[in-house]
Image: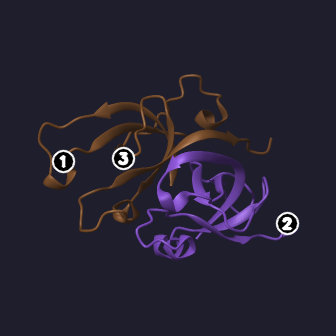
């Protein structure tokens, strides 16, 4: 589980079939003060996180395989929670 | 799943049988400076992995690649693979809060 901030998004038309139709966000891992703790990474976002929202991300690929309905999907990162803004 | 920029190709004249005909990319991971365009070279100081590709990415393309065991998921049997290109990006935007 990674605590991250949504800092952008990406659009692709040539991709693995399991990514088709998925919203892709670019986010930065952060600490509890909001400071970056590592390099930016990408994740699929079925929950619709907004810009600069704080989110929780799972790196469990087998969970994302059930999300996209493809047990051959290489997707690894997925938003699983949007953190309340006032926390 | 990491954003990266293709900076080169790698070819083998001998490879494991599972990789016959495979394309390989040399990829520079994109950090904040590369994603925001602040680094005009577009190439980060991170070490550059070699990434399996069957989407047809070329030098200069921005891609997403996956490292770790998930990279082997699209293959039927066990395969000695660490990184795979899963998307060629049409566009991206990245803007951390000031």
- Mark 1 belongs to chain: B
Dot 3: what SS?
loop
Q: Which residue is located at x 75 percent, y 63 percent?
A: A48
- Mark 1 neighbour class, 10 Å CA radius: few under 14, some 14 to 19, many 20 or more: few
Dot 1: what SS?
loop
Above or below, comparing residue A76 to residue B15 in the picture: below
Callouts 2 and 3 on one subunit? no
- Mark 2 vs 3: CB contact within 8 A: no
Above or below, comparing residue A22 to residue B57 in the picture: below
In percent of width and height, residue A5 lies at 71, 56
Disc marking residue A69:
none
Upstream in sequence: badge 3 or badge 1: 1
Viewed as shown, does residue A61 lie left or right of A22?
left
The quadrant the C terminus of chain A occupies is bottom right
Task: Identify by letter the chain in purple.
Answer: A
Q: Determine which residue is flagged by label 1.
A: B20
Q: Determine which residue is flagged by label 3.
A: B54
Q: Determine which residue is flagged by label 2.
A: A85
In percent of width and height, residue B81 lies at 28, 56
Viewed as shown, does residue B31 lie left or right of B6?
right
């Amino acid at each position: 589980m990674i605590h991250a901030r949504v800092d952008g998004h990406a659009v692709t038309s040539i991709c693995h079939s399991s990514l088709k139709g998925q919203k892709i966000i670019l986010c930065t891992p952060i600490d509890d003060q909001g400071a970056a703790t590592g390099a930016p990474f990408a994740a699929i976002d079925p929950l619709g996180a907004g810009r600069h929202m704080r989110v929780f991300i799972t790196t469990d690929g087998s969970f994302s395989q059930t999300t996209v309905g493809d047990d051959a999907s290489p997707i690894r990162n997925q938003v699983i929670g949007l953190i309340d803004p006032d926390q | 799943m990491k954003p990266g920029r293709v900076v080169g190709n790698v070819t083998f004249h001998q490879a494991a049988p599972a990789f016959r005909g495979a394309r390989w990319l040399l990829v520079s991971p994109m950090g904040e400076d590369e994603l925001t365009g602040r680094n005009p070279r577009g190439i980060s100081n991170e070490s550059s992995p070699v990434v399996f590709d069957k989407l047809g990415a070329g030098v200069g393309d921005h891609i997403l690649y996956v490292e770790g065991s998930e990279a082997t998921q699209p293959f039927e049997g066990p395969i000695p693979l660490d990184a795979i290109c899963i998307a060629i990006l049409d566009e991206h935007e990245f803007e951390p809060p000031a």
